[in-house]
Image (spheres, rainbow, N blue to C red):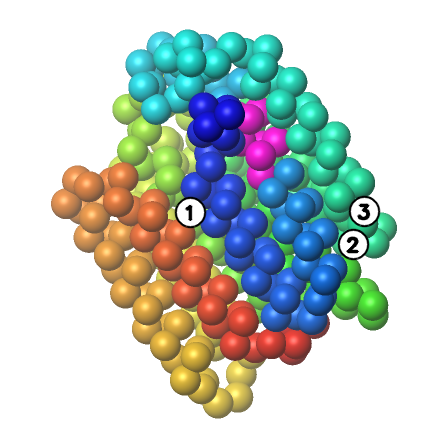
Amino acid sequence: MWTLLRATHFAPSIAVTSFATLLALAAGRGWGAAWVTAAVLAGQFSVGWANDWLDAGRDRAAGRTDKPLATGALDVGTVRSAAVAALTVTVPLSLASGVGAGVVHLLAVALGWAYDLGLKATPLSVLPYAGAFGLLPIFVTLGLPDGSAGRWWAAAGGGLLGAGAHFVNALPDLADDARTGVRGLPQRLGPRRGLLAGALLLGAGVLVVTLGPGGSLGGVRAASLGAGLVCVTGAVLAGVAGRVRLAFPLAIATSACVVVALLGQGTILA
């Protein structure tokens, strides 16, 4: 079971699900936050399993020892079945938050699958990340009784963070991607420009969410702004120092800072 969970891209899946759950609680979803948790987790697992299933040949060619399919610890059929099952379950779990909210979340999941199915190898590779993470706050708030689409700065901040994470996440695998024919936007920009693009997008996400609501900055937003910019700086320094695998956890930490800032806004998210 743990081997199968590893193929979901487990840590990022849990991080995204946790962020969505906290946003749902802060926005006032109450017990409805459980539906958000279940839907986002199922959707993330489906996208993660699809990624490893569809990339199995590339991962074997690249000698990826961190991928269970590449090492033979799992077979393709098992992971494919898990991906389809998770996607199927995602539909009713998403619609449990309401038709509008459910459609928004299913669109976000569809963007993830589009990335796995081929967009990752094109100059448009950043769009699924930006779109899916930008839709996540909208999914949360549309599930409220009044069906609010939420605040522009929450959606914009999510999209910027997702786009930035895409560039940072790609850094460790640029050489393997070049050998296996993956030519997404980070691969086309190269390591230095890709790192710069990721840092700028992450930094912009922090600024939009912490400064976008206007009014007094307040202690929580000020702390989130400072911590987020420190994490972005750390990701840049890690990339420059050649420790590119450290840059992605710092990108997740940046997202956590932004979520804290969003939590500080409470119900004005809606």
Q: In terms of sequence position, does the residue under pointer 1 or pointer 3 come before the other?
A: 3
Q: Secondary structure at mark 1?
A: helix
Horizontal side of 254 relative to 48 (left or right) equals left
- Three-letter amino acid code at disc 1? Ala
Count neighbours of disc 3 (C-alpha within 10 A) and say few if under 14, some if 14 to 19, many if 20 or more: many
Q: Which residues are magenta?
A: 44-51
Q: Nearer the viewer, residue 185 or 118?
A: 118
Measured along the vertical axis of the image, is residue 206 above or below residue 58? Answer: below
For the residues carrying marks 2 and 1, which lies nearer the camera in this image? 2
Horizontal side of 231 relative to 46 (left or right) equals left
Residue 12: x, y in percent?
A: 46, 43
* Residue depicted at 75% across the width and 46% down the height: 94
The image's mark for residue 97 is 2
Count neighbours of disc 2 (C-alpha within 10 A) and say few if under 14, some if 14 to 19, many if 20 or more: many
For the residues carrying marks 1 and 3, which lies nearer the camera in this image? 3
- Three-letter amino acid code at disc 2? Ser
Horizontal side of 182 relative to 156 (left or right) equals left
On the image, numbered disc 3 is attached to which residue? 95
Q: Secondary structure at mark 3?
A: helix
Q: Nearer the viewer, residue 151 or 8?
A: 8
Count neighbours of disc 1 (C-alpha within 10 A) and say few if under 14, some if 14 to 19, many if 20 or more: many
- Three-letter amino acid code at disc 3? Leu
Farthest residue to the left: give it.
Answer: 241
Q: Secondary structure at mark 2?
A: loop
Residue 173: x, y in percent?
A: 32, 29
3D distance between C-alphas at marks 1 and 3: 28 Å
Measured along the vertical axis of the image, is residue 14 above or below residue 184? Answer: below
On the image, numbered disc 1 is attached to which residue? 165
The answer to whether the residue labelled 1 contacts the one labelled 3, judged by CB atoms less than 8 Å apart, is no
3D distance between C-alphas at marks 2 and 3: 5 Å
Q: Is residue 151 magenta?
A: no
Farthest residue to the bottom: give it.
Answer: 216
